[in-house]
Image: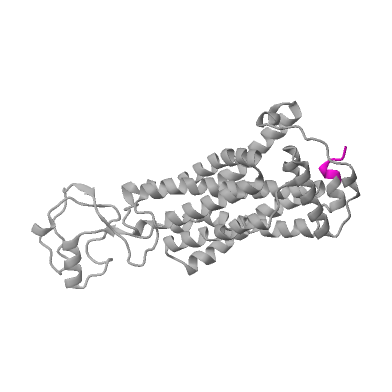
């Protein structure tokens, strides 16, 4: 009985076919990084001040600057009737406000502000915590998507799962950019997290299943390093596109390109063998060998049936349990600095 790893030796553990697929899949890490760190630019809170029309009129009439006279507050104002309060252009004669109560105010943002806060959502002061929800909803989608699309990829195949995730990411990402209110944005961001995480994770699995054992570690590391490239590129993209809605469109548009991968990237032969679809696996393997310019003498013996696997296999033996918990701990530790 011939294993798929034995066949990969003759196909080429990291030949032209795998390199082509690797380069295509690495592009998936770029928009994943843009979506993940976009909060830095989309949720930027600029300097702001209390909006008070009467004071604004006096400021314009007297030629005051924001630094003159009464200092503007970011979130609080005196609870007084400014229409009956004496104001004049003499900055040395401030109105008598001692003892007046303090209250929340309506906030004015700079006209050049193009972040979430400028979209009539009032995400400042007492509502500033909602900006954190913008990222939390995405992280929740990442968490759920890891489980949901992990199962879908095992049940229906990596290729179909990848297609589904890309469609979901593109539609939900573009919908975020045109959402009418912040509640819709939070819901759509959660859905976006589902698709983005599912797409990225499925690529990772597909890549490691297509290369030889000695190349899996290298491929996995390089694939994740592209995220760092995406984060660096995000700075330039955000500089050129300051408006948060258009920035969201740019981060979501690449998933339209990734949908086309369905016709250029084959299914994982290893997964096909696990589903006892041997003939399909052999056809794909033959095409890989042809692209790699290799011959397949090993195909005279068909690969044997692969036993079905489940999530419980990760905890079935002491060695697997140890490795599983180590990986869980490592992923948690490396993710926390980014989340915080």
> Where residue 209 sits: x, y (%)?
74, 46
Eyeballing the image, is 277 above or below 261? above
> Where residue 193 sits: x, y (%)?
51, 47
- Residue furthest front in the image: 279
Q: Is residue 41 visible?
A: yes
Residue occupying image coordinates x 75% and y 58%: 19
**In this orientation, which residue lies closer to the viewer: 22 or 113?**
22
Residue occupying image coordinates x 61% and y 55%: 29
> Where residue 125 sits: x, y (%)?
32, 50
Residue occupying image coordinates x 63% and y 41%: 156
Which portion, as a residue range, is magenta? 1-6
Q: Quadrant of residue 4?
A: top right
Number of dots carrying numbers? 0
**In this orientation, which residue lies closer to the viewer: 142 or 58?**
142
Q: Quadrant of residue 146?
A: top right
The quarter of the picture where the N terminus appears is top right
Colour logic: one colour
Q: Is residue 340 visible?
A: no
- In the displayed structure image, the side of residue 323 where residue 333 appears, left or right: left
Residue 238, magenta (yes or no): no
Eyeballing the image, is 112 above or below 309? below
> Where residue 286 sits: x, y (%)?
81, 52
- In the displayed structure image, the side of residue 107 where residue 97 appears, left or right: left
- In the displayed structure image, the side of residue 254 where residue 329 appears, left or right: right
């Amino acid at each position: 009985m011939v294993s798929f790893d034995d066949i990969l030796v003759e196909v080429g553990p990291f030949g032209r076919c795998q390199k082509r697929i690797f380069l295509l899949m690495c592009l998936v890490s770029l928009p994943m990084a843009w979506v993940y760190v976009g909060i830095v630019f989309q949720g930027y809170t600029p300097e702001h001040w209390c909006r008070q029309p009467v004071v604004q009129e006096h400021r314009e009439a007297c030629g005051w600057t924001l630094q003159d006279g009464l200092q503007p507050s970011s979130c609080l104002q005196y609870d007084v009737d400014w229409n009956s309060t004496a104001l004049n252009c003499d900055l040395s004669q401030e109105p008598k406000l001692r003892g007046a109560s303090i209250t929340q105010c309506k906030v004015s943002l700079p006209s050049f502000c193009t972040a979430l806060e400028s979209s009539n959502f009032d995400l400042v002061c007492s509502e500033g915590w909602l900006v954190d929800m913008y990222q939390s909803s995405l992280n929740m989608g990442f968490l759920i998507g890891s489980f949901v699309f992990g199962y879908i990829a095992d049940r229906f195949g990596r290729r179909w799962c990848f297609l589904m995730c890309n469609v979901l990411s593109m539609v939900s990402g573009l919908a975020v950019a045109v959402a009418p209110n912040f509640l819709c944005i939070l819901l759509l961001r959660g859905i976006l997290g589902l698709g983005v995480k599912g797409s990225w994770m499925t690529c990772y699995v597909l890549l490691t299943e297509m290369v030889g054992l000695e190349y899996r570690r290298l491929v996995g590391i390089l694939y994740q390093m592209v995220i760092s490239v995406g984060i660096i590129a995000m700075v330039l993209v955000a500089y050129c596109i300051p408006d948060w809605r258009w920035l969201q469109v740019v981060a979501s548009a690449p998933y339209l390109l990734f949908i086309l991968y369905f016709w250029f990237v084959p299914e994982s032969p290893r997964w096909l063998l696990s589903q006892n679809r041997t003939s399909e696996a052999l056809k794909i393997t033959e095409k890989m060998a042809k692209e790699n310019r290799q011959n397949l003498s090993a195909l005279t013996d068909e690969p044997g049936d692969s036993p079905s696997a489940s999530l419980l296999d990760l905890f079935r033996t002491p060695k697997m349990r140890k490795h599983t918990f180590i990986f869980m701990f490592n992923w948690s530790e490396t993710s926390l600095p980014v989340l915080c």
